[in-house]
Image (tube, rainbow, N blue to C red):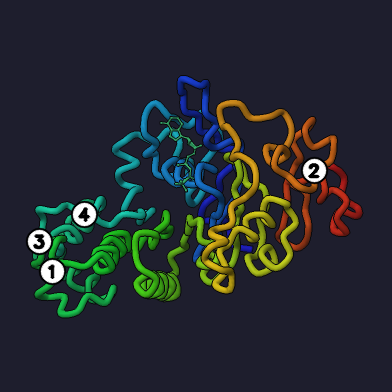
Amino acid sequence: MSAPLLQIDDLRVRIPSRRGEVKAVDGLSFSVAPGEVVGIVGESGSGKSMLALSMLQLIPKPGRITGGRIALNGRDLIGLSEAEMREVRGNEIGMIFQDPSASLNPVLRIGRQVAETVEAHHRVTPAQSWRRSVEMLQGVRIPDPEARARDYPHQYSGGMRQRVVIAIGMANAPKLLIADEPTTALDVTVQAQIMGLLGRMNKETGTAILLISHNIALVSRFCTRVLVMYAGRIVEAGPTAQVFANPEHPYTRALLNAVPRIDRRVEEGLQTIAGRPPDLASLPAGCAFEPRCPARLRSCAEEQPPAFPVGEGRFARCWLAEHSKHQQGNSRS
Ligand SMILES: Nc1ncnc2c1ncn2[C@@H]1O[C@H](COP(=O)(O)OP(=O)(O)OP(=O)(O)O)[C@@H](O)[C@H]1O
């Protein structure tokens, strides 16, 4: 296997609060290979956004990274100066967030906003950056890009604005694109177009994509590998098709059962996972899912489960997985 593009080890993010210190990310490790498309799923509050923001060193104060390593192409981003991080953001790592309107400047022409991203990282003339901008707008399928580059954000639809955000995110051909709920604010048809566009960009440019979403169907269509997050940790990981077809962690199963199904009657409403989400300011000593887990053992409340391998490229942090058939020959890690 090629050297990882992104390697995160034992990352910890803490947010001081009146209730105590919130462990938003709690000893999390994973890697992304060049060109890979990885999904991160989990309920609201599981720490997905804090993880994304920590990679860009944009965690809102008083939150902060208290430990671990975030290596991009072997270089640890933790501890880089703000000037060095500005060079990483938008150049080595592109980003797309949920609300396109919040990412765009309302009083600046669309074309200028794309051009500025190019200018921030390259010595180019205004004519060159404008040309690149029009080229990027064409790439994200903005019709008549030459003319539309002169428009302001309010003259674009929501879907078109998100295409512009993608053009900005991809303008410098980053090696990694972090997309945090990139289609949540859009209607279903536009969602599909945007995901199609991201998929095409991944194939054409080889940019790896980290897609953060609570939308299981989207992740299952788009990502080859999935990381399931609960209480600031990855509780299950592996090839998407296998994890979703045959989940090993009871939380992954609960998450899949909570997916709304077209054939369910509207009155039944959205299924949610029984029990309360964990309080990240006072996590239990054992498995954080234990209080809600339908399959818990007595020991689950006592000790946090390590990551048990449960097949090729898969693991689950669950004591039940300790006895999985894949464990034969493996001792506790
Ligand atoms: N300023 C803050 N003070 C205290 N706790 C916070 C603060 N900001 C976030 N948190 C907590 O940090 C945890 C992680 O939040 P995060 O936004 O990363 O979750 P998420 O999985 O992205 O959720 P969503 O899908 O709703 O965006 C949450 O439990 C949240 O309550």
Q: Secondary structure at mark 3?
A: helix
- In-front residue for pair 261/205: 261
Disc 1 and disc 2 in contact, CB within 8 angstroms: no
Q: Earlier in the sequence, mark 1 or mark 2?
A: 1
Q: Nearer the viewer, mark 3 or mark 2?
A: 2
Q: Nearer the viewer, mark 1 or mark 2?
A: 2
Q: Earlier in the sequence, mark 2 or mark 4?
A: 4
Residue 130 placement, left or right of 248: left
For label 1, the residue is 149
Q: Position of residue 108 (x, y in %)?
A: 11, 55
Residue 201 visible, this angle: no
Q: Earlier in the sequence, mark 3 or mark 1?
A: 3
Q: Residues within 10 Å of mark 2 (few under 14, many from 20)?
A: some
- Checking the image for residue 126, the label placed there is 3
Q: Nearer the viewer, mark 3 or mark 1?
A: 1
Disc 3 to disc 2, C-alpha distance: 62 Å
For label 2, the residue is 296
Q: Position of residue 75 (x, y in %)?
A: 47, 44
For label 4, the residue is 104
For image coordinates 53% across by 59% down, the residue present is 269
Which picture quadrant has residue 216? bottom right
